[in-house]
Image (cartoon, rainbow, N blue to C red):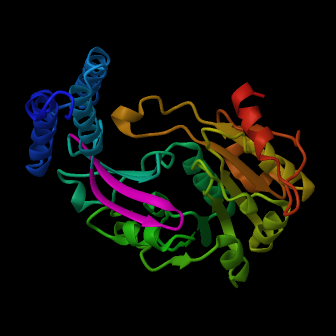
């Protein structure tokens, strides 16, 4: 500004700042892109980046373009509109709607922890579980097979609540309890403004807040099925994967009970870890890597990796004969409260071992 004068600087700044102001106005009036918002936004931002390279020697013009790009990415995230956001000790939780207003999603950081279809006549009937929890997926198969092997499911414990999707897998006469460490997650899942899984499927009061390793061990109940669903984020609770933790889970099982570990993770191979801690306690391990959900952007179903542990194979019922399920043996050292090896879990994932 001192070198070229105020007018020259403002002349270079105004295009970018005007475009940024326009984006803010569109956001305030809730103007959304029709259809898939990702492509036009990508083209827009790539074009802005190209102009930045052209004007790299004109700082004011460059800064204006940077402001426009930052405002656009902050307010118009491709494919979604943020409707609620809250921070807790465990990170930032975000509730977002797709641009076509057909689905609502729960994020922790960049990880999706649940999705629900919204609009139309959907408010008059129980919501359909999506993402990893869709009917017919590996977790659904575990629930159905355990129910069939036992004749019924009396009590079920679920570690990790998310949006509450698994609640809609329960049937009349069953008692499902959710163990969740983060009260903010419980508050979001209970709020009908965001998700309806808990309210529609009758589980709003069956939530225990606290570290599940402690609260589950303190429970006086025994469960036909325990689902450990806490490992899909970038940072995992290692203490829920150790041999000592497993001993606590087994102590809360009925004689023919099953433990299911949802081990889907972008960065770590955790199936081997579960198989190892199971083998250390003389439990049988079966594993499935789903390949049935192939278009998340269209149906919001996600492929899950699931390991089940049980004392004896018959407790799994028909699960062992379903496509994709296979028995796995321990090939790594079992993790304990004194030993874990996250770097090798990352390497196994990256190298496909």
Residue 116 in the image: x percent, y percent? 34, 52
Image quadrant occupied by the N terminus: top left
Against 224, is 21 above or below?
above
**Magenta span dominant secondary structure:** strand
Q: Which residue is drawn at 84% across and 55% down?
A: 312
Image check: 211 left or right of 209? right
Image check: 227 left or right of 335? left
| Foreground pick, 50 / 302 | 50
Q: Where does the magenta region start and end?
A: 82-99
Image check: 29 left or right of 257? left
Q: Which residue is drawn at 75% across and 74% down?
A: 252
Query: Can see residue 205?
Result: yes
Image quadrant occupied by the C terminus: top right
Q: Which residue is drawn at 72% across and 62% down?
A: 240
- Residue farthest top in this picture: 54
Image check: 138 left or right of 17? right
Residue 112 in the image: x percent, y percent? 45, 48
Against 228, is 37 above or below?
above
- Residue 78, image quadrant: top left
Q: Which residue is drawn at 55% across and 77% down?
A: 209
Q: Does the magenta stretch include residue 90?
A: yes
């Amino acid at each position: 500004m001192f070198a070229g004068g105020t007018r020259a600087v403002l002349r270079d700044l105004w295009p970018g700042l005007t475009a940024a102001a326009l984006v803010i106005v569109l956001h305030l009036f809730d103007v959304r892109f029709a259809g898939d918002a990702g492509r036009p936004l990508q083209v827009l931002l790539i074009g802005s980046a190209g102009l930045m390279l052209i004007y790299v020697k004109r700082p004011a013009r460059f800064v204006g373009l940077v402001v426009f790009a930052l405002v656009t990415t902050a307010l118009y995230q491709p494919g979604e509109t943020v409707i609620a956001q809250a921070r807790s000790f465990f990170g930032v939780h975000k509730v977002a709607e797709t641009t076509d207003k057909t689905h609502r999603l729960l994020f922790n950081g960049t990880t999706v922890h649940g999705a629900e279809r919204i609009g139309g006549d959907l408010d008059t009937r129980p919501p359909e579980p999506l993402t990893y929890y869709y009917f017919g997926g590996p977790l659904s198969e575990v629930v159905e097979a355990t129910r069939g092997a036992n004749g019924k499911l009396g009590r079920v414990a679920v570690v990790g609540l998310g949006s509450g999707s698994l609640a809609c897998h329960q049937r009349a006469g069953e008692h499902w309890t959710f163990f969740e460490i983060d009260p903010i997650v419980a508050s979001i899942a209970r709020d009908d403004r965001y998700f309806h899984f808990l309210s529609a499927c009758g589980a709003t009061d069956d939530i225990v807040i606290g570290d599940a390793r402690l609260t589950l061990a303190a429970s006086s109940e025994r469960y036909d099925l325990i689902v450990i669903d806490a490992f899909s984020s970038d940072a995992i609770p290692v203490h829920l994967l150790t041999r000592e933790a497993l001993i606590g889970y087994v102590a809360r099982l009925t004689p023919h009970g099953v433990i299911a570990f949802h081990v889907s993770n972008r960065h770590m191979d955790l199936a081997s870890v579960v198989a190892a801690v199971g083998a250390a306690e003389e439990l049988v391990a079966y594993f499935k890597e789903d390949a049935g959900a192939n278009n998340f952007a269209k149906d919001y179903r996600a492929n899950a990796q699931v390991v089940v542990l049980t004392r004896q194979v018959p407790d799994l019922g028909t699960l062992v004969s379903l496509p994709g399920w296979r028995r796995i043996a321990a090939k790594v050292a079992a993790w304990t409260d004194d030993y874990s090896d996250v770097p090798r879990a990352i390497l196994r994932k990256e190298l496909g071992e």
